[in-house]
């Protein structure tokens, strides 16, 4: 089958045909009506506690209707913008929707504070089936209401974000999405999109990787100042809001919203720090495999080894993923096949498309949309598997109410990294030693990003917040901070002269004011997924149903309670050590194969 049979751009017509189509405009009007219904209901009903159970039931139903419709409208606008940052209609629609969302802030604050005033909330929940279904949501709202300001203050903060952090985030997105890099390719000067340049780091030719990396770093000088301003603006806003609301720090705020304990985080970070020495052995071994003594160059971290230089067509990528997902369960394989064939994926490299990769689970229509850049590497296949894992997570939750479908950041990366593990392990199992060595290198490269590089990003963001409390940081200071964090994580395994001081510029995670520290959730997801995969290897077919049950509970459980679904104590250092041991064994296997094959 030819590779061009599959369309590499996604279809959004399942949402709307355009911003001016009848359905989009009708839904905008309906959204306004639902907003009025929410607000009117609050004014009338949250003045006393008579018939509290009925009031809560009805308000939950209206909320679910609002978010289902908002999710559909926002999904269309944000996906359009992600695929084409210059689309003015998408930007305008997003601003309109953000403004509409501010209209319900007063009502949500009113409901949250009213709910907290109910002394017998537990009893009321038990008296109603719809409320029992939303027990976790209601208790979480009641608990978190202590961090809410007065209604007028919450409204002001929400509106100020539109011209504050939202605008800064948009600036970073637009600058990086449309950024072109000057590079010499075979004696020809070219201007290439950042996404294309970054994919060159996965090429087999070392000189090309080095040239692309240096061109990328040199190009950032043109945009570092406005993006530094964006970073300072967003982090400053977060600090201000945390102080106003009574959070001890942005990290405390993140842990609360992540439904995760400080003890849980520290247990995981402890094991990550202990693992750095093993990863440094891996990087130094990889340097030898690539043919030079001493530490690895930063631009060689993603260098392919052996058969991983093979180029795959998009059709081959689909077949590879579906086949290996099927080795786990037909349900997962069928989901991936459907995503490819129904054009849920935008994989085409082009200017104007935002960098990185993501999956948007469109709860409103029970589908997902995935954005990535596919240029034919095995890394691209791993990325597709990762994002399809997010999509499968949404697929399991599609029959839950919207309020019961929103899971916290740490668990968000579990299904995605579990799927990556399936693909790589199944591939390694059915190949010769040289190919296994190649795939294992890809696995360890990924693990290194999720453990070592993520640790550096955590250190960077944590220190950035500390310093930002006192003043803004210049781009020079931010660069120095990034280099410090990378040296702490990579140690002497990476040539310090090749480290990336600009790694903060194109990582969108730093620019989400509502999702700070969007780094350690990846490590949580990887290690939790490794632990789950170990359970799968023991239980095999009986594990699949239990795993789907875990995913179905992610919108209505704390992180610790989710662990208990699988009989895992996530505060136990031994669990994290046993998960990391799976990675350490891969490092030992890699070093042994390197000594044998190279």
Image (tube, rainbow, N blue to C red):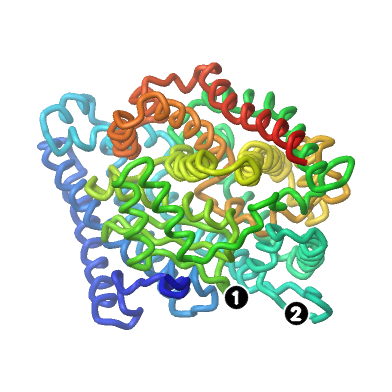
Q: Is residue 203 above or below residue 473?
A: below
Q: Marks 2/1: CA distance? A: 13 Å
Residue at 31% in and 61% down: 70
For the point 63% across and 49% down, which residue is it? 235
Residue 555 showing in the rendered view? yes
Give the position of the N terminus as an image quadrant: bottom left
**Viewer can see residue 469:** no
On the image, which quarter does residue 496 sit in? top right
* The quadrant where residue 17 appears: bottom left
Seen from the viewer's position, the closer of residues 517 and 247 is 517
Q: Which label is found at residue 351?
A: 1
Q: In x, y percent, where is residue 39?
A: 24, 56
Name the spot of residue 497 as percent of width and height, x first.
88, 49
Locate the C terminus and report the quarter of the image it occupies. top right
Dot placed on the residue nearer the N-terminal end, 2 or 1? 2
Q: Quadrant of residue 155?
A: bottom left
In this image, 545 relative to 10: left or right? left
On the picture, is 124 further left or further right than 117?
left
Q: Mark 2: few, some, or many residues within 10 Å (few <14, many ≥20)?
A: few
> How many labels sit on residues?
2
Instruction: Find numbered disc 2 in the image and state the secondary structure of the residue it sits on.
Output: strand
The correct choice, above or below, for 233 with respect to 124 in the image is below
Q: Position of residue 29 (x, y in %)?
A: 24, 72
Towards the viewer: 564 or 375: 375
**Tag 1, which secondary structure?**
loop
């Amino acid at each position: 089958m030819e590779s061009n049979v599959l369309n590499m751009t996604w279809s959004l017509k399942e949402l709307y045909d355009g911003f001016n189509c009848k359905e989009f405009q009708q839904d905008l009007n309906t959204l306004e009506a639902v907003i009025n219904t929410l607000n009117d209901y609050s004014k009338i009903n949250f003045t006393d506690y008579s018939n509290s159970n009925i009031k809560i039931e009805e308000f939950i139903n209206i909320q679910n209707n609002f978010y289902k419709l908002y999710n559909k409208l926002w999904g269309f606008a944000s996906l359009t913008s992600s695929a084409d940052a210059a689309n003015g209609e998408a930007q305008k629609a997003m601003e309109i929707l953000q403004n509409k969302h501010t209209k319900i802030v007063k009502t949500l604050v009113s409901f949250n504070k009213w709910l907290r005033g109910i002394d017998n909330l537990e009893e009321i929940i038990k008296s109603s089936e719809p409320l029992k279904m939303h027990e976790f949501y209601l208790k979480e709202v009641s608990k978190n209401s202590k961090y809410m300001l007065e209604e007028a203050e919450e409204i002001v903060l929400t509106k100020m974000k539109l011209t504050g952090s939202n605008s800064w985030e948009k600036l970073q997105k637009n600058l990086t999405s449309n950024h072109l890099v000057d590079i010499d390719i075979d004696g020809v000067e070219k201007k290439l999109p950042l996404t294309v340049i970054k994919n060159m780091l996965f090429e087999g030719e070392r000189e090309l990787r080095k040239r692309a990396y240096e061109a990328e770093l040199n190009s950032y000088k043109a945009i570092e100042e406005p993006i530094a301003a964006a970073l300072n603006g967003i982090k400053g806003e977060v600090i201000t809001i945390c102080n106003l609301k009574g959070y001890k720090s942005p990290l405390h705020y993140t842990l609360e919203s992540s439904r995760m304990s400080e003890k849980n985080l520290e247990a995981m970070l402890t094991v990550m720090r202990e693992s750095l020495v093993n990863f440094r052995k891996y990087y130094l071994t990889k340097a030898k495999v690539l043919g030079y003594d001493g530490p690895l160059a930063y631009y060689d971290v993603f260098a392919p080894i052996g058969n991983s230089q093979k180029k795959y067509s998009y059709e081959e990528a689909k077949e590879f993923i579906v086949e290996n997902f099927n080795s786990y369960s037909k349900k997962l394989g069928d989901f991936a096949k459907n995503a490819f064939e129904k054009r849920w994926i935008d994989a085409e490299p082009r200017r104007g498309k935002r960098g990185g990769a993501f999956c948007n689970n469109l709860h409103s229509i029970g589908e997902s949309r995935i954005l990535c850049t596919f240029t034919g590497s095995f890394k691209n296949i791993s990325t597709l598997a990762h994002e399809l894992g997010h999509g499968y997570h949404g697929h399991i939750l599609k029959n839950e109410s919207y309020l019961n479908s929103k899971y916290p950041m740490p668990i968000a990366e579990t299904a995605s990294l579990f799927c990556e593990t399936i693909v790589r392990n199944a591939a390694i199992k059915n190949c010769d030693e040289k190919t296994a060595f190649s795939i294992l290198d890809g696995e360890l490269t990924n693990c290194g990003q999720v453990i070592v590089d993520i640790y550096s990003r955590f250190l960077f963001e944590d220190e950035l917040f500390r310093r930002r409390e006192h003043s803004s940081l210049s781009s020079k200071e931010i660069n120095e901070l990034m280099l410090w964090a990378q040296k702490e994580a990579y140690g002497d395994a990476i040539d310090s002269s090749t480290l990336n001081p600009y790694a903060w510029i194109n990582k969108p995670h730093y620019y989400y004011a509502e999702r700070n520290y969007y780094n350690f959730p990846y490590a949580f997801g990887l290690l939790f997924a490794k632990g789950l995969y170990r359970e799968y290897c023991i239980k095999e077919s009986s594990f699949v149903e239990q795993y789907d049950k875990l995913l179905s509970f992610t919108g209505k459980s704390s992180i610790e309670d989710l662990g208990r679904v699988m009989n895992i104590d996530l505060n136990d250092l031994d669990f994290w050590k046993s998960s990391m041991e799976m990675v350490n064994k891969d490092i030992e296997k890699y070093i042994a194969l390197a000594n044998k094959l190279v």
